[in-house]
Image (tube, rainbow, N blue to C red):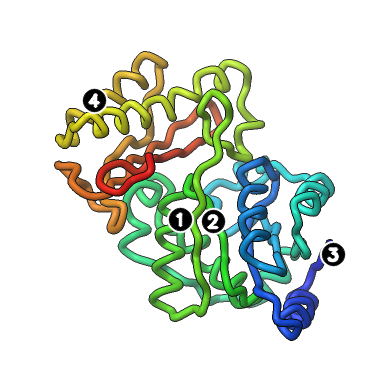
Amino acid sequence: MIILRTVAELRDAVGAARREGKRIGLVPTMGAFHQGHLSLVQRARARCAFVVVTLFVNPTQFNESADLARYPRDETGDAKLVESVGADVLFAPSVEEVYPRAYTTTVEVAPLAEPLEGIVRGTQHFKGVATVVTKLLNMAQPDEAFFGQKDAQQALIIRRLVRDLDFPVRIEVCPTVREPDGLAMSSRNMLLDDESRRRAPALSRALFAVSDAVARGETDTEVAMATGRSVLADAGIEPEYFAAVSAETLASVNVIEGETLVAIAARFGSVRLIDNVIVGAGSAS
C-alpha cells in the first residue's frame, strides 16, 4: 500500500490501475478506523481490483471548532489497519490540498439536508459533506464508492447528488457494524467515559424495540415509537431526535407501510452519537 498526499499523485495511481483494466473502488473516511471502516474496505476489495481509502477530517462539516479539534486522529495506526485488509492507496491530503486558497464552490442537496441532522446541526453540515464527497469522487474517479448505513441521511444525500449530477459511479451502502452489546461502531465511541459507554447501547435497544414492534405487525408509527421511547427513558436518555421517516424522502410518516428509517441522535456529555434501522416492507432490520 502507498500513502499519497496530492490529487496529482492520486490521479496518476488511479490512471495506471485503470490502464491495466482494474475496477476502482473508493472508501471515503475521516480516519480513526474501527471494524466498521474495515468492513467497507473489505467490501471494496471484494468488488474492485484497486481500492483507494481516503483519510480526511473535513473541517467544513463540523459546526463546532472544539468538535473538530477533538476528533480522533491516528494516521499511522489507520494506515496499518487498511493495509491489512487490502487497500492499495491511502489518500491523506492536507486541508490546503482539498480546499485551495480562494476556494468558494459548494454543493447542496435540499431538501434531504433539512430534517434530522439538518435540524440539529444545520444544513451547512451536509453542504460540507456533499462538497467534499463531490471533490473526492472527482479526484479518484472510482467505478464504485462505499459508505456505511450508520450515516443513513448522509448516504441518501450522496446517492441523490450522484444521480442528480450524473456521476458515473455506483454507490453501495453497507450494513452498520455493531459492538457485541449493539452499540453502532463509531470513531466517537472511544471518547465516551465509562458511564456513558454503559448507557449508550440503549440507543440501539430503542431502535430494535421499534423494529420488533413493526415485525409483530404494528403499523401505527406512534405506537411503535413508544416502545423505543420507553427504552430510552429507562436509560435516562433524552434524544436530540428519535424519528420515523420515509427511507426515500425523509418525510415523517404516521403509518409504517413501506421502508421506514427510524433514526436517533443523542449526546453523552460532549460526545454525540447517531444510529438508525430500516423497518417495514423489504427491510433487513
Where, by quadrant of the figure, is residue 276 drawn? top left
Quadrant for the C terminus in the image? top left
Under mark 4, the amino acid is Ala
> Residue 241 vs residue 97: left or right?
left
The residue under label 4 is 226
Under mark 3, the amino acid is Ile
Query: Between tags 1 and 3, which lies in front?
Result: 3
> Residue 197 vs residue 113: left or right?
right
Which mark is first along the chain, 2 or 1? 2
Which mark is first along the chain, 1 or 4? 1
Q: Residue at x 43, y 79 (%)?
A: 165
- Up-down: is 168 above or below 253? below
The residue under label 1 is 154
Query: Between tags 1 and 2, which lies in front?
Result: 2
Q: Where is residue 263? Give x, y as percent.
A: 36, 40
Q: Where is residue 158? Give x, y as percent.
A: 46, 64
Quadrant for the N terminus in the image? bottom right
Distance between the Cα atoms at labels 1 and 3?
Answer: 28 Å
The answer to the question of whether label 1 and label 2 lie on touching residues, with beta carbons closer than 8 A, is yes
Q: Residue at x 15, y 35 (%)?
A: 220
Which mark is first along the chain, 3 or 1? 3
> Residue 80 vs residue 169: left or right?
right
Q: Residue at x 74, y 85 (%)?
A: 19
Under mark 1, the amino acid is Gln
Q: Report the disc number at residue 147.
A: 2
The answer to the question of whether label 1 and label 3 lie on touching residues, with beta carbons closer than 8 A, is no
